[in-house]
Amino acid sequence: MLMLASAAQGAVSIFLIAPAYLIVVWHNHDHLSIARAGTLAALPNVGMVVALIAWGALADRIGEKVVLVSGLSGCAIIAAACTRVHSFASLGFFFFLGGVFAASANAASGRVVVGWFPEHRRGLAMGIRQISQPVGATVAALSVPGVAQHFGTSWALAIPAVAIGFVAVACAAQLQNPHRVASSQFNEPPQNPYRMSSYLWRIHAVSALLVVPQFTLSVFGVLWLVTDRHWSAVSAGVLIGVSQLIGSGGRIVIGLWSDRVRSRVSLLRLIAVAASVAMVVLAVLDHAHWAVAAAVFVIATTISVADNGLAFTTVAEVAGSAWAGRALGAQNTGQFISASAVGPTMGALIVSVGFPWTFVAAGAVALLAVPMVPRRDESARISP
């Protein structure tokens, strides 16, 4: 079940991040401005925002398997359609629609993991599930730029279509919904958990802010390496892929660490501080034109993706099984609203003031998250 949930999330991640690795092609060969290309790359995330809570509510009501299989199948069809269109408007429409279907994987796969694992193993299990996102980004980074450069963008966009279609078939054949037990047996909240305290709202806000440095690096990393550091597109894609892969290991370590110390929010606060510092250091080194900036880029990327599993786990635990799908949908909605804004805003900022000050701005946003992290964890309300 963990493998299927992770594969579902990883496959849709390839679709969501692939357009970011086509920004250089669109800019250099199709003569799109950086701001327009960044907007195009952000549209799958806009589609996610529209549909996340609805998919989560559907998973709460009818179960995870139906949601995953139907959503993945639709996303695979849309991704395949993207290979046949080339105009800016048509690609934007299909990227948006694909994001709507891709949203099914986020809340439903998270419910699968939370439902199948007990509290003292949930951090590690969710960390493993969360690495599927940087693994998907790694697959995209290692394949999409090179394929686009040699064979064109249509073949590059066929990669997520094939991956998502394969996982959809696997989930249809093997996925099982976790058993549901009456919430009264585990003292789950009888009412809306969002009315009980500000805890969930604060976690959502923190996660939305920490998305800014993460997506600044992932969306514009290739462009930074090619235009500012003068790397080839293929070499830049390899470095992005390596950084995402290292970040995957970091998510597992952080998840296991949170199980050991029995706290999610203390580590979440530490990551927010570290992300802010890393972005400022990267900006200073880039401004000074030091070669070591590429190594710091890898470190900053690793830190910037480390918080997702922690936040996702604590949201599901506090929401309870009756509300987990909607809460996880709300969690991702906040994140993808931020992610959708990163493309156009950071793209415009890069044009206006350059990469170093853009990195500083992303670090400042991460610093804003520090005082918003709750002081202590709330008791988990989901039991195995």
Image (cartoon, rainbow, N blue to C red):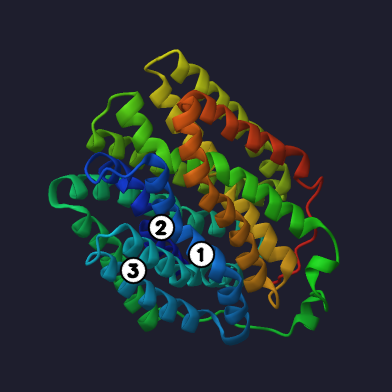
Residue type at the position of mark 1: Met
Q: Which residue is mark 3?
A: 164
Q: In the figure, 277 relative to 198: above or below? A: above
Q: Is residue 94 at all visible to an observer of this figure? A: yes
Where residue 195 sits: x, y (%)?
A: 84, 68
Identify the amino acid type marked 3: Ile
* Mark 1 residue element: helix
Q: Amino acid at mark 2?
A: Leu
Q: Please, what secondary structure does the residue beneath circle 2 have?
A: helix
Residue at left offset 70%, top offset 74%: 323
Q: Are marks 1 and 3 in contact (CB under 8 Å)?
A: no
Label at residue 197: none
Q: CA distance from mark 1 to mark 3?
A: 16 Å
- From the viewer's side, name the closer residue of 358 and 88: 88
Relative to 45, residue 292 above or below? above
Question: Dot 3 lies on which element?
Answer: helix
Q: Residue at x 69, y 84 (%)?
A: 181
Q: Please identify the residue farthest to the left as the structure is shown.
A: 150
**Is 138 above or below relative to 331?**
above
Disc 2 packing (10 Å; few <14; some 14–19; many ≥20):
many
**Which badge, 3 or 2, is on the more N-terminal residue?**
2
Report which residue position mark 2 lands on: 16
Res. 54 image quadrant: bottom right
